[in-house]
Image (cartoon, helix red, strand yellow):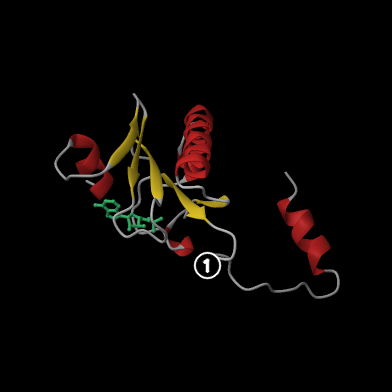
Amino acid sequence: MTIFEKIINGDIPSTKIYEDDSVIAILDIAPRAKGHTLVISKKVYPAIGDAPVELLSHMMEIVKKVDMKMRDALKADGTNVIINNSPASGQEVPHLHIHVIPRFNGDGISFFPPATSYADGEAKEYGDKLRI
Ligand code: AMP
């Protein structure tokens, strides 16, 4: 059982800011910025590819509400919306969730890996591999 299932079942306390039939949103226990929120699917799907698109769409609807609330209540200037998708990406809890982290102009936080570059012809190669 994942730690989020224990939270959903009420076995572990959390600071809940939203709940409906399929989703809860709670404050992250180790916030990367105060107000850092996790929008969590109630049903366990380890990764995006496992989850129905209707659920993903609904989770983004709640992310939008959280983002707007952060701008209003915390006067956030922006947010980072992040999904760590499978352990290779740094995902610690194998239970689909979306991080929403409030950001402020000049706060100096960086979540993105450093930029890299393509060798000649490599962008076309990757484009050809990834075209959907
Ligand atoms: P991830 O690395 O994307 O799987 O993120 C998991 C997140 O869950 C981390 O940011 C943790 O701080 C957070 N977390 C772990 N345990 C709890 C908990 N009991 N309550 C709230 N957040 C938690």
Q: Tell me which residue sits at (22%, 42%) in the image.
A: 7
The residue pinned by badge 1 equals 109
Which residue is situated farthest in the right direction here?
120
| Camera-nearest residue between 73 and 1 | 73
Q: Tell me which residue sits at (35%, 25%) in the image.
A: 20
For the question of whether residue 2 can be seen, the reply is no
For the question of whether residue 19 can be seen, the reply is yes
Q: Tell me which residue sits at (36%, 28%) in the image.
A: 22
Dot 1, how many residues are within 10 Å of its Cα: few (below 14), some (14-19), or many (20+)?
few
Relative to 30, 100 lies left or right: right
Quadrant where the C terminus sits is top right
Q: How many marks?
A: 1
Q: Tell me which residue sits at (19%, 35%) in the image.
A: 9
Going by the numbered disc 1, the residue's amino acid type is Ile
Relative to 110, 73 lies left or right: left
Q: Position of residue 11 (x, y in %)?
A: 14, 41
Q: Secondary structure at mark 1?
A: loop
Disc 1 under 8 Å from ligand 1? The reply is: no
Q: Position of residue 29 (x, y in %)?
A: 29, 55
| Camera-nearest residue between 52 and 11 | 11
Q: Position of residue 30 (x, y in %)?
A: 32, 60
Instruction: Tell me the quarter of the picture where residue 93 sits.
Output: bottom left
Instruction: Tell me the quarter of the picture where residue 73 sits.
Output: top left
Ligand 1 in which quarter? bottom left
Which residue is situated farthest in the top direction here?
21
